[in-house]
Image (cartoon, grey):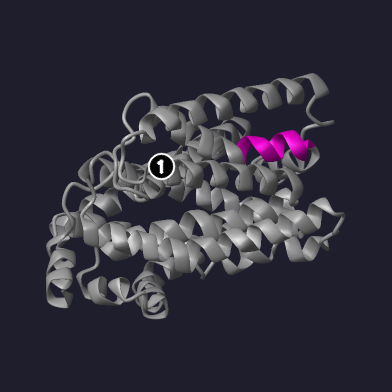
Amino acid sequence: MTDATELAVWRLARRQLFVPVDIILLVLSVACAAGLRIPEPLQYVPFALGLVIFGLPHGALDHLVPARLADRRPTVATVAPVVGLYLVLGAAVAVLWVVSPIVAFVFFIALTWFHWGQGDAFASAQRTGDRLGWPRAVGFPLLRGALPMVVPLIAFPATYAVVLGATTRAFGGSSPSGTLAAGIRLALGVGMVVLVISVTLLDVRGRRGTPGGWRAWLGDVAEVALLAFFFSTVPPVLAVGLYFALWHSLRHIVRLSVLDPVLARPLAEGRWGLVLLRFTGQAAPVTGVALLILAGLFFALIPRAGGNPMDLLGIYLVLISALTLPHAVIVAIMDHAQGRGHGRTEAPSHVQASAEAGS
């Protein structure tokens, strides 16, 4: 069971951070469903802002995770393995892009599917602090990762093909011709419906008897409905960019901030400006290094890829793919240390101390 103080922080974040994001996504979805056409240049804005706000920085503190999980100060012994992990796995992904761009793209989609589902599984468990349990622990992230990865493929197959071409062209890959066949889209749609129904029924059974009970179940269902509506109506580049920054990254930032001893009281008081300011400052050095690598990729690949916004986005996604693999491994370690991502058994000592001081 999640410690009451940490659970309270997540509930406060849900009310003050996540619900406003839900409203933004819902309003935009309704507007697009009603016929709003968003100019293409504006669709790239979330990805552009994500270079320095939430998106790229959200994994920039991975080197501090081992120490924070152990409730200790970081040392060379705790930081070095994470740096090594990033160098080895990031290099492996980069080599894959050179050797087989199409395979690298498919791997990136599958990895993002897993990782985004992984993040949502932990955040959802913080509604009540309960454990997902088997097979819900598999079905839940499978569904949550499928919403941003599969629904746009069904609703906007042509855009998917354009993004594929943009990411593979710089490495000698050929751009796909045509779009996804209607039969395949139908099969994917049926598969998504079956997945939604199956996971929803599993969630009913899993939430029964838990502290949040039906309210937690309804919260999960509402998020699935919102994300399905959002990704089926909003242009994919805009939708994925917003989701990456405001949904996935923001939840992970809250998760990391809970482990920061300096932020125990600001989190409990809902001082999100201070929380985000400290996180941004801590993430700035590593984010800066990532931006330098991205700049190097631009100069190296643009002559072959081109310089239009979609080509630039493609190069950015290549960098993200190299960073996502080691980042997903770090998050998996966090999941294991925090009860396999399904509820913390005990809050860090600094969180408990803050709760006792404020009681």
Q: Amino acid at mark 1?
A: Ala
Please tell me which residue is depicted at 35% across the width and 77% down the height of the picture. Answer: 278
Main secondary structure along the magenta-highlighted residues: helix
Q: Which image quadrant: the N terminus?
A: top left
Please tell me which residue is depicted at 43% across the width and 41% down the height of the picture. Answer: 214
Q: Give the magenta-colored segment's residue range.
A: 149-157
Determine whether 128 is above or below 8 in the image: above
Residue on which disc 1 sits = 121
Q: Position of residue 100 (x, y in %)?
A: 58, 31
Residue 151 is a magenta residue = yes
Q: Position of residue 105 (x, y in %)?
A: 59, 37
Determine whether 144 is above or below 267 in the image: above
Identify which residue, 330 or 191, lies in the foreground.
191
Label 1 Cα neighbours within 10 Å, binned few <14 / some 14-19 / many ≥20: many
Q: Position of residue 58 (x, y in %)?
A: 43, 61
Q: Position of residue 257 (x, y in %)?
A: 31, 65
Task: Kindly indicate the quadrant of the structure image that contains residue 238.
Answer: bottom right
Please tell me which residue is depicted at 28% across the width and 63% down the height of the picture. Answer: 258
The local secondary structure at tag 1 comes to: helix
Determine whether 81 is above or below 12 in the image: above
Please tell me which residue is depicted at 56% across the width and 66% down the height of the picture. Answer: 20
Task: Kindly indicate the quadrant of the structure image that contains residue 325.
Answer: top left
Q: Which image quadrant: the C terminus?
A: bottom left
Residue 54 is a magenta residue = no
